Image (spheres, rainbow, N blue to C red):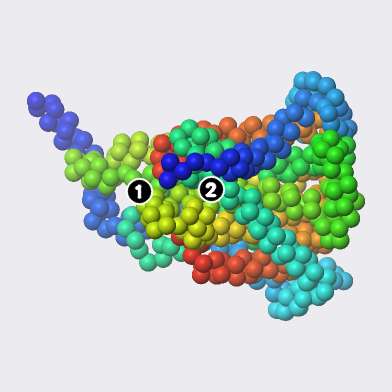
Amino acid sequence: MHSERTPWALRLAAYGGLAFLHFPLLVIFAYAFNTEESAFSFPLQGFTLHWFSDAWARPDIFAAIVLSLKVATAATVLALALGTLAAMALSRRPFFGKNAITLLLVLPIALPGIITGISLLTAFKVADINPGLLTIIVGHATFCVVVVYNNVVARLRRMPMSHIEASMDLGADSWQTFRHIVMPGLATSLLAGGMLAFALSFDEIIVTTFTAGAEVTLPIWLLNQLGRPRDVPITNVVAMTVMLITTLPILGAWYLTRDTTDTAGGGK
Amino acid sequence: MSSMAISRNGTTAKNGLGRRISALLYRKPVLTLLLLLTPPLLWFGVVYLGSLLALVLQSGYTFDDFTMQVTPVWTLANYQALFDSTNLDIILRTLFMALAVSLMSALLAFPLAYYMARHARGAEKAFFYVAVMLPMWASYIVKVYAWTVLLAKGGISWWLIEKLGITPAYEWMLALPHVGGTTLATSNFGRFWVFVYIWLPFMILPIQAALERVPENLIAASSDLGARPWQTFGYVILPMAIPGVVAGSIFTFSLTLGDFIIPQLIGPSGLYIGNMVYTMQGSIGNMPMAAAFTVVPIVLISIYLAISKRLGAFDAL
């Protein structure tokens, strides 16, 4: 079939589609360096780096970045632990309820965030837990588990069981086998899964609006800015920063798993 | 030699417990399974399922409009209220938007996915994969923000419409009932377009995955048997791509149903299910009604999933 020639209209549609997907993202980059202060007029007015230092000097933005980094780190660590355990359990032989458990892991991300968000909020109210840092982390960890799980389970399926058996036969115990045989094999998939989980947590907004209480993560800071447009240039800079902080781990995760059949990031 | 033997013995003695545990775990895979599964199951069982249960229970509680208090007295009033004409309007508006967005995403995604799966090779294929994956993972709120910038008064969209000389067509579109509005940013069309943009990558990748699975020899057989290229497309490739389209539409449908930020920032007034949930739990404090409203997308998505399953979409996920 690869002898079949590509119609020019199809190629145009494909590249046009890509351009459509990327154009708004490029717009964010362009406006971050724009000199205009209170509107989004086009053509752009001029070039400046001024807003970066302004944004850096704002304590509210700094606090939001620190909070988002804290949440993403904690959620990633929890997701790595829970996702790896689940993957090790579910990659083995089939057992009763296996499909139900897989579904349960996927649900928090397959259902709209609003359902996860309001459910958690209801439960926190019932349990008399005040929304704050801890509740944000709990919410994020819940939907991050599945990306770690997906990466690790794909790797485990390709890892030959004979290596593990050989290790045990040669006298290693379960921990030593895990430490010296399973872990090195899993390393890149854990790193890839962890980076995706970090990116997912760092820019999450819908679940966070319900579980954050009075805390302001970076995406929530952005949303608040959108409601009442002011500080336009600084908002542009923050938007670009969020974009960069999430893009780099995603590219990294793709790079780490690019030669395998289950490339990271195929599903969000 | 003897010192080595001692050290070996020493190691064996120290690891004796470890070995015994290992042997036990190896002999009893069910025990291993339980040990591995307990932490994730506890988390998902208690935190996630527990929360969903709390939500469903909450939707049956009574909310007193005067005292603004929730009392655990069972009632169906919240569900009844969903069928009030204003609430029914909100539900139908959201449902219609979700269907329209899914349809348009499928139309836009198909050529791109087709090119990716059947024409791009090697480096070009990798490029396409990354180029679709990046916007999918890029921050949701930044993407929405980008569109408010694009559609802002005097912004790029205004400039482009003027430069392309399509102002009459633009004004005609804005004058359409249900679609138009005073500007692109406050029209239903603008809102629809932003939804399509945000969820499009979620449609491209499942279609691409489904098209990748069409075996070469099937295409060869079709053309050997005398089918013209468009017949091969219509009778062989398209039917095999449908599960991918349905799988993608599960994402676009479900994500649109639950969104409350795009309807809040772009398009005319007129609430969506997500806005109702957000307002009810927030400023009004009527958790039972917010919970009942949340059950609506759960039910709609379940119906959608049941239909999709019949169409074989889950083989393509």
- What residue appears at the point 55 percent right and 70 percent down from the top-left corner? B306
Q: Where does label 1 land, which residue? A: A157
Q: Residues within 10 Å of mark 2 (few under 14, many from 20)?
A: many
Q: Amino acid at mark 1?
A: Arg
- What residue appears at the point 63 percent right and 54 percent down from the top-left corner? B107
Q: Position of residue B217 (x, y in %)?
A: 37, 52
User: Who is closer to the viewer here, B30 or A197?
Assistant: A197
Q: Position of residue A160 (x, y in %)?
A: 28, 45
User: Who is closer to the viewer here, A119 or B111?
Assistant: B111
Exactly how many numbered labels are in the figure?
2
A89 displayed left or right of B317: left
Q: Residues within 10 Å of mark 1 (few under 14, many from 20)?
A: few
Is A214 drawn above or below residue B227 in the view shown?
above
- What residue appears at the point 56 percent right and 42 percent down from the top-left corner? A7
Q: Is residue B137 visible?
A: no
Q: Is residue A60 visible?
A: yes
Is A247 drawn above or below residue A267 in the view shown?
above
- Which disc, if any, is residue A64? none
Secondary structure beneath dot 2 equals: helix
Q: What separation in Å lies between label 2 and label 1 (alpha carbons)?
A: 29 Å
Q: Amino acid at mark 2?
A: Tyr
Q: Quadrant of residue B256?
A: bottom right
Q: Where does label 2 land, which residue? A: B114
Residue at the farthest left position: B1
Q: Position of residue A179 (x, y in %)?
A: 33, 38
